[in-house]
Amino acid sequence: MDVYGMILSPYVARVILTARHKGIKHKLKMPEGGLKTPEYLAINPLSKIPAIKDGSTILYESGVIVDYLDLKYKKKRIVPSSAKDAAKARLLAAVFAEYVQGPTLALFRQRDPATRDQKIVEEKLAEVGRGLDVIEKLLSGKGWAASAKFTIADVYAVPCWFFVSALLPQFGMADPAAGRKKLSKYIAKLKKEKLTSAIMGEMGEAMKNFRPGQ
Ligand SMILES: N[C@@H](CCC(=O)N[C@@H](CS)C(=O)NCC(=O)O)C(=O)O
């Protein structure tokens, strides 16, 4: 399978985590010539990463790709089979994506203290805080986010946490998990497990070399 994109993208990282967890052979590469070439637009007309080519199947949108991979490669399913457990995992994934990663990425554009809009910064920090309070309530406390097993909740949580931990200290939140017991324990697990610590390390390396406009 070809995966188009780069590991620093949280959306691409979801796909790579899923593929690695399930043992799906893949190659990660940026589209030659960028995202706006006729060749890449034929793969993803939205001109975004990630996209995949898996045999004759071409797909884009990280959530759709993750679901496709989980259904096609049945080993080590990441969406639990019971409706209740699946909903629990998807709820965590949604809160990480919408209520934590969303406002965190908005802070990415406010990194420069010289040009930052302090009102936006305060609003977004408060949003992240509220999102993390909900995460604290939802976390299983049993190892991985939704249960003792790695699920789609972790696929969304890991890239989200990479950006939370890379960005929030720049805005005065030294330890974003502080005061949240289950979250702190969960983050310690993400740092300890090979699959999740490796990907966060790779995202960190990519961030060091990242130049806007890349
Ligand atoms: N909803 C999409 C979001 C993908 C996305 O926004 N990707 C960014 C990289 S992090 C991108 O391709 N940006 C390039 C651009 O907008 O020109 C998904 O989940 O795959």
Image: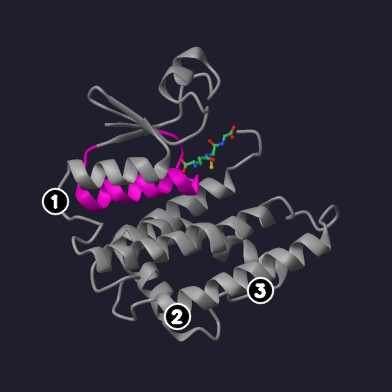
Per the image, the residue denoted by label 2 is 137
Residue 12 in the image: state x and y as whole percent.
Answer: 43, 43
Kindly identify which numbered label has been placed on residue 75: 1
Q: Residues within 10 Å of mark 2 (few under 14, many from 20)?
A: few
N-terminal label among 1 and 2:
1
Residue type (three-letter) at the residue carrying disc 3: Met
Residue 186 position, x and y percent, is: 39, 75
In the image, 11 versus 6, the foreground residue is: 11
**Is residue 17 within the magenta segment?**
yes
Extent of the magenta region = 4-25
What residue sits right under mark 3 in the picture?
173
Q: Nearer the viewer, mark 3 or mark 2?
A: 2
Near-viewer residue (36 or 94): 94
Q: Residue furthest left?
A: 75
> Which of the 4 quarters of the picture holds residue 209?
top right
Residue 150 seen anywhere in this rendered image of the structure: no
Q: Please indicate whether residue 86 sits to the left or right of residue 210 in the image.
A: left
